[in-house]
Image (spheres, grey):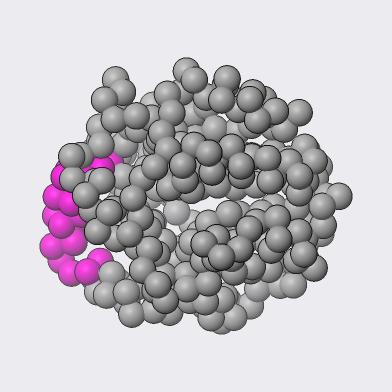
């Protein structure tokens, strides 16, 4: 990402969620509450306001379809399916006794904003780069967030997660914790992913992870367009780590985590896609749940 600007990914995902909210064939995928939050986040910065103007253009559906065909077919719908899966997994963990949710690289996600009101005794902490989080902090101030939702800015080029989160007053290491890593791991190297797994264990003992990951290019189900890597490099957000789903269990086992389950694009469509949707489904990014041992 560019210094002093919110990440392109944060802006793109929020725009995609609002696109879903406006499409009749995706009715019910995005709640009115979440759509209002995404709009508020985008209105809080110049790049977001430009994307809102794009969405308001009558040719926006054509533009989105054309961009997706070149980069990631079905990706805007995938954002909605991905967030529904993550939300369900976090709620299941909370209902099973988790007391703290930490969202790493939260971007303009609306999950903690929504859930912190439903679970007032749970700690919700969002971690992101200061430039992205400064925009969100201003927006959340207008959305009347409660004290059990805290934002922690971290610049990982200068600080470590253990240093920042471990010394953060709102973080309680003794609480059962769920860590969300949505669209994060693929920007790290394999060594950095392993280091992160170790850091989360050191911070929380036996946390639950809800995360997404990419399969390698050329995997059988993948439908990633050829221009994606080039586009991300121009945004300063190049991809680094990919892994076959068949290798994920052994990889996590090496970090003392047990893989609970993996959800593919087919699984997400069956569970969450509105019946009226007839377009493509994104394949290549999968969702997983793992628990430290």
In the depicted view, which residue is nearer to us: 175 or 77? 175
Question: Which secondary structure dominates the residues rendered in magenta?
Answer: helix
Q: Quadrant of residue 146?
A: bottom right
Across and down, in percent, residue 51 comes to 28, 69
In magenta segment, residue 72: yes
Q: Quadrant of the C terminus?
A: top right
Looking at the image, how many numbered discs can be counted on the residues?
Answer: 0
Q: Quadrant of residue 41?
A: bottom left
Left or right: 174, with 280 as reference point: right
Left or right: 125, with 249 as reference point: right
Q: Quadrant of the N terminus?
A: bottom left
Q: Quadrant of residue 19?
A: bottom left
In the depicted view, which residue is nearer to us: 36 or 135? 135
Outermost right residue: 174
In the depicted view, which residue is nearer to us: 32 or 128? 128
In this view of the protein, can residue 1 be seen by the observer? yes
* Vertical placement of residue 135 versus 80, above or below: below
Q: Residue at x 59, y 80 (%)?
A: 141
In the image, the segment drawn in magenta is 54-74
Q: Residue at x 43, y 28 (%)?
A: 243
Q: Residue at x 18, y 51 (%)?
A: 67
In this view of the protein, can residue 271 be seen by the observer? no
Across and down, in percent, residue 279 comes to 24, 38
* Vertical placement of residue 30 versus 269, above or below: below
In magenta segment, residue 268: no
Across and down, in percent, residue 101 comes to 69, 52
Q: Residue at x 86, y 50 (%)?
A: 174
Across and down, in percent, residue 44 comes to 43, 79
Left or right: 241, with 170 as reference point: left
């Amino acid at each position: 990402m560019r210094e002093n600007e919110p990440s392109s990914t944060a802006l793109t995902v929020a725009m995609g969620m609002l696109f879903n909210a406006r499409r009749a064939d995706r009715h019910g995928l995005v709640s009115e509450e979440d759509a209002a939050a995404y709009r508020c986040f985008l209105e809080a910065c110049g790049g977001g306001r430009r994307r809102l103007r794009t969405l308001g253009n009558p040719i926006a559906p054509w533009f989105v379809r054309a961009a997706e065909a070149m980069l990631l077919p079905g990706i805007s719908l995938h954002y909605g399916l991905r967030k529904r899966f993550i939300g369900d997994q976090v709620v299941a963990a909370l209902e099973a006794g988790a007391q703290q949710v930490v969202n790493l690289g939260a971007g303009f996600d609306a999950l903690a904003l929504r859930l912190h009101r439903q679970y007032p005794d749970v700690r919700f902490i969002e971690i992101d780069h200061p430039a992205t989080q400064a925009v969100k902090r201003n927006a959340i101030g207008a959305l009347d967030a409660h004290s059990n939702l805290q934002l922690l800015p971290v610049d990982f080029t200068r600080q470590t997660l253990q240093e920042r989160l471990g010394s953060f007053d709102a973080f309680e290491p003794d609480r059962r914790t769920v860590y969300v890593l949505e669209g994060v791991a693929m920007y790290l190297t394999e060594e950095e992913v392993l280091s992160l797994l170790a850091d989360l264990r050191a911070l929380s003992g036996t946390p639950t992870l809800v995360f997404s990951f990419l399969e390698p290019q050329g995997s059988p189900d993948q439908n990633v367009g050829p221009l994606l890597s080039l586009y991300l490099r121009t945004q300063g957000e190049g991809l680094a780590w990919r892994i076959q789903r068949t290798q994920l269990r052994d990889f996590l086992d090496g970090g003392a985590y047990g893989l609970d389950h993996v959800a593919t694009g087919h699984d997400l469509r069956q569970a969450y896609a509105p019946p009226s949707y007839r377009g493509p489904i994104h394949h290549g990014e999968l969702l997983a749940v793992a628990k430290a041992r």
